[in-house]
Image (cartoon, rainbow, N blue to C red):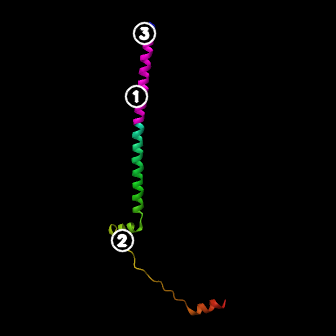
Amino acid sequence: MLFFLITLFSISGILTYLWVYNEINITCRENEALRRIRDNIIEENRDLHNDIAGLNRIDRISQIVKKELQMVSPAPESLVVFVDPELLKDFNKQ
């Protein structure tokens, strides 16, 4: 009877050890998969930031505006202001 109990406890101990060992292996594999996913997301995020920086450049924006939207820059204008000399005389007196 004692041999039977010792054998039963030994087998249950070995099975418990194997179950815990298997759970640890599964968890380690899941952790490694999650690390790879995280690294891929970080790389994708870095690529998206580079794309945004490239699209925010003023030369890229002006190129899109000219080609796709067919917009043009307006010709420069000059502003001429005529001042009445009589008003200047009155202003200088004050």
Quarter-wise, where is residue 34 in the image?
top left
Residue 6 in magenta stretch: yes
The residue indicated by pointer 1 is 22
Dot 3 or dot 2, earlier in sequence: 3
Residue depth check, mark 3 versus mark 2: number of the one nearer the observer: 3
Residue placed furthest toward the top:
1
The residue indicated by pointer 2 is 71
The residue indicated by pointer 3 is 4
Quarter-wise, where is residue 12 in the image?
top left
Residue nearest the observer in this picture, 19 or 70: 19
Please state the horizontal and vertical placement of residue 25, each as a whole percent of the image.
40, 32
Q: Residue at the spot x=42%, y=45% of the render?
A: 38
Crowdedness near tag 1: few (<14), some (14–19) or many (≥20) residues, C-alpha within 10 Å: few
- Quadrant housing the N terminus: top left
Please state the horizontal and vertical placement of residue 48, each as a whole percent of the image.
40, 55
Dot 1 or dot 2, earlier in sequence: 1
The relative height of residue 57 versus residue 36 in the rendered view (above or below) is below
Crowdedness near tag 3: few (<14), some (14–19) or many (≥20) residues, C-alpha within 10 Å: few
Please state the horizontal and vertical placement of residue 45, each as a whole percent of the image.
42, 52
Regarding mark 1 in the picture, which secondary structure is present there? helix
The relative height of residue 93 versus residue 31 in the rendered view (above or below) is below
Crowdedness near tag 2: few (<14), some (14–19) or many (≥20) residues, C-alpha within 10 Å: few
Amino acid type for the residue under numbered disc 2: Met
Bounds of the magenta span?
5-29
Residue nearest the observer in this picture, 8 or 77: 8
Regarding mark 2 in the picture, which secondary structure is present there? loop
Please state the horizontal and vertical placement of residue 64, each as a whole percent of the image.
35, 66
Label 1 and label 3: CA atoms lie apart by 27 Å
- Quadrant housing the C terminus: bottom right
